[in-house]
Amino acid sequence: MFKKISVLLLAIALMLSVPACSMPDAIFSDDVRSGEENEGLSGTADIYGFKFTLGEYELQLPINYGALSVRGWKISEAAETAEDEQPAANPDAKLYTEESTLESGEYSEYLPLARGDSIINAKFYNDGKKPKVITECQVVGIRLDAEYENVPAFIIQKDNLSIGCKYSDVENSCGNPSYIERHLKSTGELVSINDVKLMETEEETVSTLFYKLTDHSFISFVIDTVNGVASSVAGITVENDTEEYKAYDYSKEYKYKPENIDLYKGPNLLGKQYTDFAYKYEGNLYTLPIPVRNLLDNGWEFVREYGERIPIGTTVDGLIMRKGNMAVRLMVHNYDTKYAHTAVNCYAVSMEASLTGPNVNILLFKGVTLGTSEKALVEAFGKDYLKKHTIVDEEGNYIDAPQYDMYEMPDMPGCYIEKTVGEEYTVYSCVMPDDVSTITLPVSITDIGDTGAGLLGDIRKHIDIYIDNNTHHIFKFYLQNCPEYVVDENKIIEEQMEAQRKKEKEEWEKQQKEKEAAANNG
């Protein structure tokens, strides 16, 4: 089944989350603002094979530690002594030895492995169900830095990219990155993500280009700068925690289209308000939930094999689709009432966009997009948004919660907005009532149990908008809309009557044949 992927926590506590979606009866606005299209997204599937050459050996992540140790790379004194030698060492990082243990699902920090006087950094991961000694865990990341004295020969098997190659070589080979971070050379402090500035500075910076599928499946290139101009690759990280899958042929499933797919009606315009799940994503207009085949038709493709069949009425997390170097993680739901299906014939019930990947061009109601200011977002909610609710605890007492506000939407019964202020970011959660359903299927709702309800949480329909507290601009969207089934009683009755008529006809024909046979025998 699909693998669940943990939430990504970045240095500035930006995180990715799982979105979800639905198919509302929306009234759309005439105010459609087109954003710039993300050009230059070339086919770069080969870079995501996570293959590289280290010294004289060709390797692919993930890999067993033993495959490195037999080639001379070992956790030894380097792990205890290299802390001061590492350019970006974390003084609070845990030091590891060959006797160190990782808990189930735990990742290590990057730690030094030595072979002779050469040092690389490696990340370990315990994918088992019990604690393991680190030497029994998988190596899921390899990092090299040009500032080490003896950098081993290291080549990404994509046009021979290596330490010292030019900035232009990376972009020519791999296309536009998923996103770019700039850090101060002196302190490593984050300066900007893409074009969004987190701080003003005139100091020299370095840029890191990320080509990313998931939190732990990416390749990054640190680009040194000279007088503010990008020059050469000064560091490379290759990280992947998932075994490579073979692509599956979904052409047969694609030819068969379940009846419920025809229920989807995409929008012609953006929605007027946040309750309209009508938005623009990489140049295409969608309404959530989206048939996965619509994403395939618009250039998205499966990253790995997803040939497992999803049971009737089930929600599954972890489907990853890619368009160029933009990769998005989805939840999908099987709305068919007769058969289990692969993802091709299911609906995507979630979508995401983030400055730190997937940095997808997204446009929501009233021009809200990545980089929109908090002030503009509040204005887009409308004047009714200013009506405030008081927070009450379970015992009915009023709570002084300065970091949490709730606002109702008088024109939208049952809808409200929660505003939660954290240390580094603020979240506006736009919540909609779950009982507003628009998926009509000829089946009783009691006939289908949603085994994926735990993935959806208590709320099936919401949009989470993340604001960076330094810049006061949007850095992430998390959309979820998974409507429940609606009973079409008339269709159920018609089908039952038709089945009864068919049964009676078959019984009559059987009796007639028996009479004819008896007459012939007599």
Image: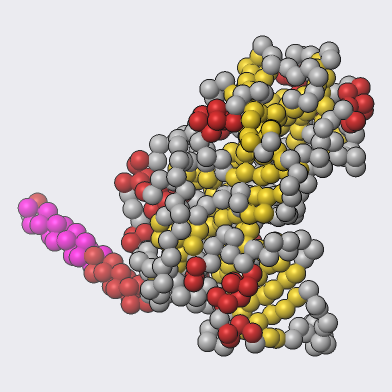
Residue 368 in the figure: left or right of residue 266: right
Give the color scheme: rainbow, by chain, secondary structure or one colour. secondary structure
The relative height of residue 353 versus residue 28 in the rendered view (above or below) is above
Image coordinates for residue 403, horizontal then vertical, percent: 78, 74
Residue 308 in the figure: left or right of residue 195: left
Queried whether the magenta region covers residue 507, the answer comes back as yes
Q: Nearer the viewer, residue 250 or 506?
A: 250
Q: Nearer the viewer, residue 467 or 102?
A: 467
Residue 425 in sight: no
The relative height of residue 11 versus residue 66 in the rendered view (above or below) is below
Which quarter of the image is occupied by the C terminus? bottom left
Q: On the image, which quarter does residue 140 sit in?
A: top right
Residue 171 in the figure: left or right of residue 70: left
Residue 273 in sight: yes
Image coordinates for residue 191, horizontal then vertical, percent: 72, 49
What residue do we see at 35% from left, 46% from top? 254
Residue 245 in the figure: left or right of residue 130: left
Residue stretch rendered in magenta on the structure? 503-520
Image coordinates for residue 121, horizontal then vertical, percent: 78, 28
- Which SS does the magenta portion mostly show? helix
What residue do we see at 76% from left, 33% from top? 123
Q: On the image, which quarter does residue 477 sit in?
A: bottom right
What residue do we see at 37% from left, 77% from top? 489
Q: Nearer the viewer, residue 137 or 367?
A: 367
Which quarter of the image is occupied by the N terminus? top right
Queried whether the magenta region covers residue 510, the answer comes back as yes
What residue do we see at 45% from left, 40% from top? 40
